[in-house]
Image (cartoon, helix red, strand yellow):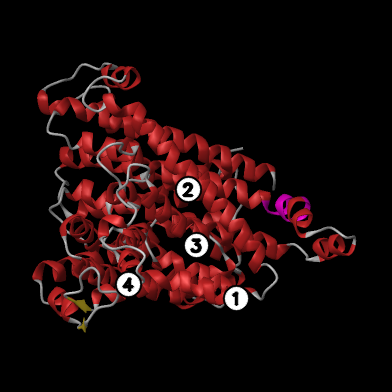
């Protein structure tokens, strides 16, 4: 059966706008990643950019594997730590009235990733707020005594920024699900002598899995593809993939552009796979 | 106690930004500013570049949310009220742009904008912003329509009202809160957009996040903080206004801004 003409007409504006903008941008991107650069009169398609990336050659390609590793590290660490903290927080908040806490958690939505990055910078640079307080308390004598927590080569500042932003998000998802479940299970288990750890592992965890797993995958995918935070709080080397992609894309060396575009498309593809997988999982679990 | 800690964690960014923004000549190792002043704000609000950035950001976000509402309305209505074959795929097609990183979309769009002469123009930026805002507008409105009772419209029709009159006196009034929330979300996403503006605007249109981003690389903490607070004002107001709706619908706009 086909949808009616009226349905198609009503869907048309949205679908047309999205398809044209998205389709054109992806097509142009793909063409450029394949070496189609009208600016320098290059019109023959080739796989040089992709081959460079895989073999670790070329302006951007040299850094590809290192950047991939770095991106995986910050995405994995941020996601895991956020998920664990959110689980903990949601369990803590579960037994209280909701309105207040959901407002408090939604409040964080007002703070864009960019502002969280600024906050972490002000807080944690070697002459930042915490360093000043540590000095006042006599814990350190000079800025250099304060550990390097932002613009560090392990991405600690980046991970902390994401924690601030993603923990409330995941906590909300988990709480929304817990809210629909009765507390009876926990009470029965408690009555039967289950300790806190057993109640958590055998009841809470299976209950929240349908929110926690897709939510975490979403967070991972977002962080893996995001540019702003690693650009603000990262170091020159190693760079996260999105940073490497954008900086190669704007490189005056036009050959680096194809590689930058190729990286960006690879990142998009990975992100897409993860999210589709997450959605499928969500649907299966109802 | 728990509650206090949560509030502290949630207010910490705001307090820290406020501390730096209102300070003057505050250097390491002073634990607190010796002098307090609102000079940073008056300096920014008298700076023509900042003022222009604020106006540009407001204008762009306003137009983007209005366009998203107009373009998305029919589709949201159909999705929210009807079942039709292939609905799942339509949903997927609208969902897709929310997933692809703005980086990939923006890089492609910047090439497209160069080819069509839209690079560095407000129109180009508006079109780029619609890619992430339109899906969220449709999703939010579709949710509103799912609880909408069309019978009020039939009632008006039976009483002889014209379609235009029905739209303005019945539909629009019933939907006003939902439309407002959807519009505010679109505003929020557009307002916080950095990457798409940078890539399509090519640095020629300076919005507040673009200004803030470049200030972070070279500015002093006081200016950066004051700029961040200006940047935060609309989102904070929007979240306060939509708090009730958000309480019922946790939603992944968190991952968009």
Pointer 4 or 2: first along the chain: 2
Q: Do the dots labelled 1 and 3 sit on one chain? A: no
Q: Which mark is residue A136?
A: 4
Badge 1 is on which residue?
Answer: A99
Q: Do the dots labelled 3 and 4 sit on one chain? A: no
Identify which residue, B89 or B31, lies in the foreground: B31
- Give the magenta part as a residue range: A202-208
Badge 2 is on which residue?
Answer: A78
Classify 10 Å Cα crowding around label 3: few (below 14), some (14-19), many (20 and above): many
Q: Residue A23's x, y, as percent?
A: 35, 37
| Dominant SS type (magenta) | helix
Q: Residue A167's x, y, as percent?
A: 51, 58
In the image, residue B85 lies in the stretch drawn in magenta: no
Pointer 1 or 4: first along the chain: 1
Classify 10 Å Cα crowding around label 2: few (below 14), some (14-19), many (20 and above): many
Disc 1 or disc 2, which is closer to the eye? 2
Disc 2 or disc 3, which is closer to the eye? 2
Q: Do tag 2 and tag 3 residues touch (Cβ < 8 Å)?
A: no
Q: Do the dots labelled 2 and 3 sit on one chain? A: no
* Residue lying furthest right: A192
Pointer 1 or 2: first along the chain: 2
Q: Do tag 1 and tag 3 residues touch (Cβ < 8 Å)?
A: no
Distance of label 2 from label 3 (alpha carbons): 32 Å
Distance of label 1 from label 4 (alpha carbons): 39 Å
Disc 4 or disc 2, which is closer to the eye? 4
What residue is rendered at 44% in x and 58% in y?
A165
Q: Residue B74's x, y, as percent?
A: 46, 57
């Amino acid at each position: 059966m086909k949808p009616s003409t009226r349905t198609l007409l009503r869907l048309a504006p949205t679908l047309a706008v999205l398809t044209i903008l998205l389709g054109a941008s992806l097509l142009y991107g793909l063409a450029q990643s394949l070496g189609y650069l009208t600016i320098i009169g290059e019109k023959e398609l080739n796989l040089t950019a992709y081959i460079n990336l895989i073999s670790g050659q070329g302006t951007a390609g040299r850094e590809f594997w290192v950047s991939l590793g770095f991106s995986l590290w910050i995405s994995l660490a941020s996601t895991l730590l956020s998920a664990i903290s959110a689980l903990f927080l949601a369990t803590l908040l579960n037994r209280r009235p909701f309105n207040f806490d959901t407002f408090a958690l939604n409040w964080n939505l007002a703070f864009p990733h960019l502002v969280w990055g600024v906050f972490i910078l002000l807080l944690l640079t070697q002459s930042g707020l915490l360093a000043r307080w540590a000095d006042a308390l006599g814990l350190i004598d000079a800025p250099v005594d304060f550990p390097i927590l932002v613009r560090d080569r392990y991405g600690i500042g980046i991970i902390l920024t994401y924690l601030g932003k993603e923990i409330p998000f995941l906590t909300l998802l988990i709480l929304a699900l817990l809210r629909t479940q009765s507390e009876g299970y926990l009470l029965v288990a408690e009555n039967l002598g289950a300790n806190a750890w057993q109640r958590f592992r055998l009841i809470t965890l299976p209950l929240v899995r349908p929110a926690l797993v897709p939510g975490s995958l979403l967070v991972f995918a977002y962080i893996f593809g995001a540019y702003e935070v690693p650009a603000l709080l990262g170091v020159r080397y190693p760079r996260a993939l999105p940073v490497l992609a954008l900086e190669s894309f704007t490189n005056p060396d036009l050959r680096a552009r194809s590689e930058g575009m190729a990286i960006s498309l690879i990142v998009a593809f990975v992100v897409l796979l993860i999210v589709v997988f997450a959605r499928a999982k969500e649907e299966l679990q109802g | 106690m728990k509650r206090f800690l949560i509030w502290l964690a949630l207010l910490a960014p705001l307090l820290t930004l406020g501390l730096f923004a209102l300070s003057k000549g505050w250097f390491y190792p002073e634990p607190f500013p010796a002098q307090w002043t609102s000079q940073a704000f008056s300096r920014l609000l008298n700076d023509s570049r900042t003022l222009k950035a604020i106006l540009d950001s407001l204008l762009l976000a306003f137009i983007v949310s209005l366009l998203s509402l107009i373009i998305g309305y029919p589709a949201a209505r159909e999705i929210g009220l009807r079942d039709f074959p292939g609905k799942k795929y339509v949903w997927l097609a609208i969902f897709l742009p929310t997933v692809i990183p703005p980086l990939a979309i923006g890089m492609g769009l910047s090439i497209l904008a160069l080819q069509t002469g839209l690079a560095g123009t407000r129109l180009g930026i508006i079109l780029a912003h619609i890619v992430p805002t339109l899906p969220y507008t449709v999703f939010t409105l579709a949710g509103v329509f799912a609880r909408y009772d069309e019978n009020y419209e039939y009632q008006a029709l039976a009483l002889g009202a014209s379609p235009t009159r029905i739209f303005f006196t019945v539909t629009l009034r019933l939907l006003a809160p939902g439309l407002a929330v959807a519009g505010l979300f679109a505003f929020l996403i557009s307002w916080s957009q950095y990457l798409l503006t940078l890539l399509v605007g090519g640095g020629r249109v300076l919005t507040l996040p673009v200004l803030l981003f470049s200030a972070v690389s070279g500015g002093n903490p006081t200016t950066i903080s004051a700029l961040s607070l200006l940047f935060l004002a609309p989102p904070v107001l929007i979240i306060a206004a939509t708090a009730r709706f958000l309480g019922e619908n946790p939603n992944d706009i968190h991952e968009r801004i």
